[in-house]
Amino acid sequence: MSNPDSTAPIVSFDDEPLILVDSDDNVLGYKPKAAAHEGDGVLHRAFSIFLFDDMGRVWLQQRAPGKQLWGGYWANSCCSHPRRGETVDDAASRRLHEELGVSAELTFLYRFEYHAHFGTIGAEHELCSVYVAKSDTPVTTNANEIAASQAVTPDTLDRELAEHPERYTPWLKLEWPRIRADHWDTVERVLAD
């Protein structure tokens, strides 16, 4: 488990402008974050990071209960959106530090589009860039974003997703199996460095 920082700054805002895109990642405009997730959601840029420690475990976070979508569910290490005028790479580095207190070299794995509804509350509709990173820096979670966190072995996460999928966010359930099937050699190279 990490050390939560209850004095952490607020780093996520309902009115921050998200970058709306088409399926080819062409910018179509901007929309406040809360509005971009209402109803069916509007396709926007996003990213997910899988952070590993020096023992080869991957960090998971339980989303803060106040999140608009999937509050209280377990997700990958860090996930968010680039802001207007910000590259995905820069946003991912910024957010990793804001949420987990870690700076690490990010390795891009792949990009994919998904659409998931959270009951009648809203939806994620994202063109999501997936990254992997490794750090031996102690994780300090931002309590405004993360309710709990833990590092688990890859085999443990495989088993958890098979046995208790209802505990996890839809993007984690899409991303992790693809990483294991198609990108594990890259993960192993990152872990070996």
Image (cartoon, grey):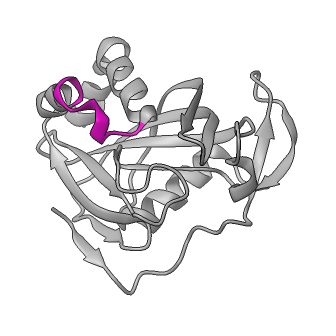
Point out the stretch of residues depicted in magenta: 161-169
Between residues 185 and 73, which one lies in front from this camera angle? 73
| Quadrant occupied by the C terminus | top left
Q: Which residue in the rendered view is the most extreme toward the top?
A: 181
Q: Tell me which residue sits at (29%, 19%) in the image.
A: 180
Q: Residue at x 24, y 29 (%)?
A: 161
Measured as percent of width and height from the top left, residue 138 is found at 21, 65
Residue 48 left/right relative to 187: right
User: What residue is at 15 percent from the left and 39 percent from the top?
Assistant: 56
Name the residue furthest right.
28
> Magenta: predominant secondary structure element?
helix
Residue 159 % position (x, y)? 14, 26
**119 and 136: which is toward the camera:** 119
Q: Measured from the top left, where is residue 20 in percent x and y?
A: 79, 41
Q: Is residue 105 magenta?
A: no
The x, y position of residue 168, in whole percent, is 33, 39
Give the quarter of the image for residue 7. bottom left
Residue 189's place in the image compared with 137, above or below, is above
Number of numbered callouts drawn: 0
Q: Residue at x 75, y 54 (%)?
A: 35
Image quarter in which the N terminus is found: bottom left
* Left or right: 103 in relation to 85: left
Which of 189/108 is in front?
A: 108
Position of 39 relative to 157 (above/below): below
Depth order, front residue of 127/166: 166
Q: Residue furthest bottom?
A: 7
Horizontally, residue 80 falls left or right of residue 16, namely left
Q: Left or right: 113 with respect to 77?
A: right
Q: Is residue 115 above or below residue 84?
A: above
